[in-house]
Amino acid sequence: MTSPLDKTTLTKRFSELTEGNWRNSFYIDCSACPYERPEGCGDFLFVPDETGRPFLYPVSYAAEQLGPIDWSECLGRMSNFMFRELYHRWLNTRTLERNCCPLRKMVPCIAWRYRQGDFDK
């Protein structure tokens, strides 16, 4: 069972993966999302971890913890569609519900997902 992670822990892990600079991540633009978007759901910063597994960090957290985030300062920008295509095989083996956004399911912070009404029981 996954244990809840608070914002500080999530931010620390993101900082480790980006070597202390959020600009070492990719910006995922979710403005054209085909899934239902609960209030508060937004864009993500993405960086692969040491094994290549995608690590997503909500931009809302990044802005709160690190200051304003300008997508043009990231390594690159992609739509959520492009991200889902890039990781489609990995996502297909881990996402059971096809009607829910797999990016929201990937956020390791259970507390954030719960507030978004997206908590796996």
Image: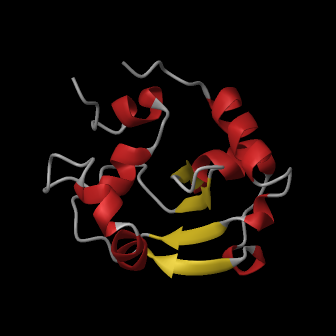
- Viewer-closest of 19 and 78: 19
Furthest toward the front, the residue is 51
Q: Is residue 9 shown above or below 25?
A: above
Residue 70 coordinates in the image, percent (x, y):
72, 72
Please state if 68 lies on the left or on the right of 105 as rendered. right
In this picture, residue 90 sits left or right of residue 50: left
Identity of the residue drawn at 34% across and 45% down: 105
Toward which corner of the image does residue 22 lie, by quadrant?
bottom right
- The answer to whether 102 appears left or right of 111 in the picture is left
Rendering colour mode:
secondary structure
| Count of number-bearing discs | 0
Q: Position of residue 34 (x, y in %)?
A: 23, 71
Residue 106 location (% of width, % of height): 40, 46
Q: Quadrant of residue 90?
A: bottom left
Residue farthest to the right, as pictured = 20
Question: What's the residue at 23%, 58% (across, down)?
Answer: 92
Q: Name the residue at 16% across, 46% down.
A: 96
